[in-house]
Image (cartoon, rainbow, N blue to C red):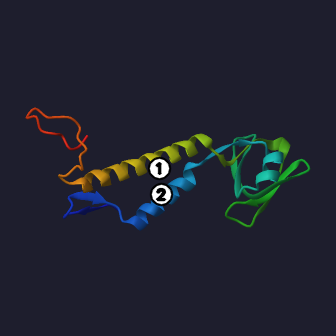
Amino acid sequence: MLRYCLNRGEWEMPLGRATLAGLVFAATGCTTVRPVQPAGYLAQNSPDVVWVTYDNNVVVPVAEAEVRGDTLRGMRQGTQQRVAIPLGQIQSVRAKTPDKAKTAILVTGALTGLVVSVYELWISKAGSESGGVHCGMNEDALAIPYC
């Protein structure tokens, strides 16, 4: 929840909520639901849920999925109902997989935010004295203290 800070005249987000929002974003930012090969992927990764699309385009979320022989077995997500789907009746199986592009964007965004925050804090704390750092002269031939 954002709130307006009157004494500083700016918007702020409480640290706990900002951290929580960042963690939620990070958790979802690094995966994508993609088609997978059920036999190999399920054996190696054991995802929480996969989405099975039948030949007639009906989609069923399956938890605890595994392939035994020529059948995908598991539990219909959210219920205790067991399912056994012959691989021949499956059009596709989708699961959450790591997404390197989203991870790179997330890391780049976080680092950019960190650099901008540190820079803003540095500039806001600098005050009128710039410690000898000048960015040229203005039209009155006075040193410009900030770049």
Q: Is residue 90 left or right of residue 2?
A: right
Tag of residue 22:
2
Asked whether 112 or 53 is in front, the reply is 112
Who's the residue at 42% across and 51% down the image?
A: 114
Of the 4 image quadrants, the one containing the N terminus is bottom left
Three-letter amino acid code of the residue under disc 1: Ala
Q: Residue furthest left?
A: 140
Provide the secondary structure element on which disc 2 rests.
helix
Three-letter amino acid code of the residue under disc 2: Gly
Asked whether 43 or 121 is in front, the reply is 121
Residue 29 screen position, x and y as percent: 55, 49
Who's the residue at 70% across and 58% down the image?
A: 48
Callout 2–callout 1 Cβ contact below 8 Å: yes
Q: Is residue 72 left or right of residue 133?
A: right
Q: Which residue is mark 1?
A: 110
Residue 66 screen position, x and y as percent: 82, 55
Who's the residue at 79% across and 58% down the image?
A: 74
Q: Earlier in the sequence, mark 2 or mark 1?
A: 2
Quadrant of the rendered image containing residue 143: top left
Tag of residue 84:
none
Who's the residue at 50% across and 54% down the image?
A: 25
**Residue 50 in view:** yes
